[in-house]
């Protein structure tokens, strides 16, 4: 299922104005043409809306480089050996998925 586009600046201003007028979230959603869930999330935190990027990655860019370097040096190493060499704070399965 594809993600919907974020609220435009115009839509955000319209939502705030309609909310100040006392309209319900359902009425605002019908007026703006968005779901009531989007309206709810925006009204909970208008400044923070659309800034959260999701779950943080287990493997940082620096660790990714160390893993790739360890593999280049010896392609016969297991993921457990790579984990020990790089000092990774993740499971060998995560390292395998990364490669």
Image (spheres, rainbow, N blue to C red):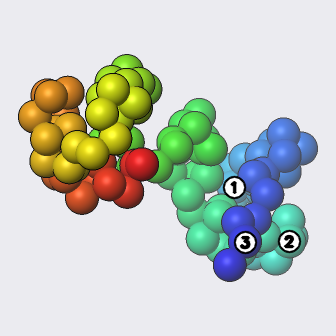
Considering depth in this image, is 12 or 95 the residue closer to the camera?
Answer: 95
- Provide the residue designation for mark 3: 2
Q: Secondary structure at mark 2?
A: loop
- Provide the residue designation for mark 2: 33
User: In the displayed structure, does residue 52 sit left or right of residue 87?
Assistant: right
Give the mark, 2 or 1, whose residue is nearer the N terminus: 1
Give the Cα separation between the discs numbered 2 and 3.
17 Å
| Mark 3 crowd level (few <14, some 14–19, many ≥20, 10 Å Cα) | few
User: In the displayed structure, does residue 47 sit left or right of residue 56?
Assistant: right
Q: Residue at x 84, y 40 (%)?
A: 9
- Provide the residue designation for mark 1: 19
Give the mark, 1 or 3, whose residue is nearer the N terminus: 3
Residue 89, picture quadrant? top left
In the picture shown, does residue 62 fall above or below 32? Answer: above
User: In the displayed structure, does residue 93 sit left or right of residue 41?
Assistant: left
Q: Secondary structure at mark 3?
A: loop
């Amino acid at each position: 299922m594809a993600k919907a586009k974020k609220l435009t600046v115009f839509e955000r201003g319209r939502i705030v104005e309609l909310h100040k007028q006392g309209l319900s979230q359902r009425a605002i959603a019908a007026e703006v043409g968005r779901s009531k869930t989007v309206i709810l999330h925006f009204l909970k935190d208008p400044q923070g809306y659309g800034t959260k990027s999701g779950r943080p990655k287990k493997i940082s860019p620096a660790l990714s480089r160390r893993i790739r370097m360890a593999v280049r040096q010896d392609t016969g190493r297991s993921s457990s050996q790579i984990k020990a060499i790089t000092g990774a704070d993740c499971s060998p399965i995560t390292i395998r998925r990364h490669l």
